[in-house]
Amino acid sequence: MYELKAVIIGAGMAGLSAGIALRQAGYEVEIYEKTSKLRPAGAGISLWSNGIKILNRLGLGKEVAAIGGQMNRMEYRSHKDEVLNHVNLMPLIEQVGQRPYPVSRTDLQQMMLDAFGEADVRMGMRCVEVKQDADSATAIFEDGSTATGDVVIGADGIHSVVRTYLAGEKIEPRYAGYVNWNGIVDASPDLAENDVWVIYVGEGKRASMMPIGGDRFYYFMGCPKPKGTKVEPKDIRAELYETFDGWAQPVQNLIAKLDPEEVNRLEISDIDPLSHLVKGRIALIGDSAHATTPTLGQGGCQAMEDAEVLCRYLLTTNLSVEDALKRYEAERKERVAQLVLKARKRTDTIYNKEPDLTQEWYKQLKDEQEKDVTDALAKIILGGPMH
Ligand SMILES: Cc1cc2nc3c(=O)[nH]c(=O)nc-3n(C[C@H](O)[C@H](O)[C@H](O)COP(=O)(O)OP(=O)(O)OC[C@H]3O[C@@H](n4cnc5c(N)ncnc54)[C@H](O)[C@@H]3O)c2cc1C
């Protein structure tokens, strides 16, 4: 279909990638964002090859390569610094046809805003409701104003209001049972080699560093905690020393080097798979449709896959918007549901939900062959639209 108008709610990765794709398809696009200043949640993100392929298609290949880290290897180590396994990622890159890039979220967001046109994002516009009739769909904002298009796309994150309309009830996120600390530090050899993604595991916790552009590491650490714990920035270093007491020296070095004021301390949640991603002329993409725990590093990549598939059906079919959205749902529903559940299972294993399984996993890591690891990653990467 040609000459459509799309109204997008939310200017995160999902909304911006859909906005760029739909504009490139020749559509009129309006993006509405509730905040007055965009601030990415979290410091870094690993964009696996499936996400990068979408960015390549959007014409952002050079830009993402420029902000991405060279992640050539991954290495699991025990919390006492014993190497559990070591994986060369080059065979995976050759198998899937594209290198992954861990990036700073601020850099990624700026790259996407530049591509869409930052001034074109309508800021300070909180959507409170959506509605539709046979010919159009409309978003209603807190200030009483409205935006009408042929399609409304809910890219409004884990607490989505568009999802509430679609599901007919408010779906509360499910706490995954652990706290994640993340941030960015300058790379240095006393932390890790600068082309390796290193992951320390032990005691049902983990601490990890990934190379990102600008000779920096994106670090993230996790530990099971009851819901609702709060720690002031000034006390975060002490909290981390206590949590990772006795862990390998590079983890101690990381805690010493990080800036406590810049640490994001997040309680991680996901949502159960939805029975519908679309209703009539209204579609969900990104976390509003399938917020996931980050243990597979796929939430943002799936948001970009959503954008690509939704745009493709709108452009390449001509029965109706409703029909294109149904085709989007049919292609995406199972894939995103499976990834949410797979990530949830992996999260439970990492974070000691059943301690026997966690201990078993530590043993398995030692026996895992390089090919098992790269095949598992390739299966996820190639299981989507960019195979
Ligand atoms: C700790 C952590 C690590 C992660 N690591 C990875 C990783 O390595 N790789 C990966 O691919 N994914 C990762 N993810 C997942 C990834 O961050 C998300 O899947 C992705 O950011 C979702 O983008 P989104 O645009 O759907 O949602 P969001 O980024 O939440 O954006 C939603 C936007 O909508 C706006 N909004 C909300 N409500 C309204 C409203 N009512 N009206 C208007 N605007 C509204 C918000 O302000 C926000 O700007 C990670 C997530 C976490 C928490």
Image (cartoon, helix red, strand yellow):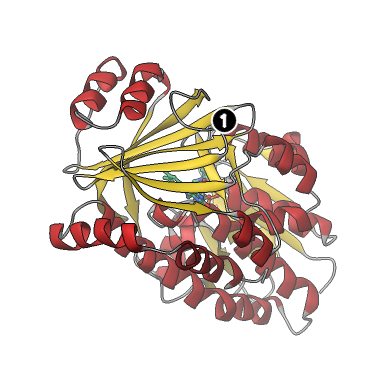
Callout 1: helix, strand or loop? Answer: loop
Residue 138 appearing in the image: no
**Residue 238 lies in what quarter of the image?**
top left
Residue 57 on image: x %, y %? 77, 58
Q: Is mark 1 within 8 Å of ligand 1?
A: no
Picture quarter with the N terminus: bottom right
Residue 275 on image: x %, y %? 41, 76
- Please tell me which residue is depicted at 79% across the width and 65% down the height of the picture: 4
> Could you tell whether 333 is left or right of 247 in the image?
right
Image height of 177 relative to 210, above or below: below
- Please tell me which residue is depicted at 50% across the width and 73% down the height of the picture: 335
> Could you tell whether 198 is left or right of 125 in the image?
left
Residue type at mark 1 is Ser
- Please tell me which residue is depicted at 65% across the width and 65% down the height of the picture: 96
> Could you tell whether 177 is left or right of 308 in the image?
left
Residue 302 appearing in the image: yes
**Nearer to me, 64 or 261:** 64
Residue 137 on image: x %, y %? 63, 65
Picture quarter with the C terminus: bottom right
> Could you tell whether 309 is left or right of 379 in the image?
right
- Please tell me which residue is depicted at 31% across the width and 42% down the height of the picture: 82
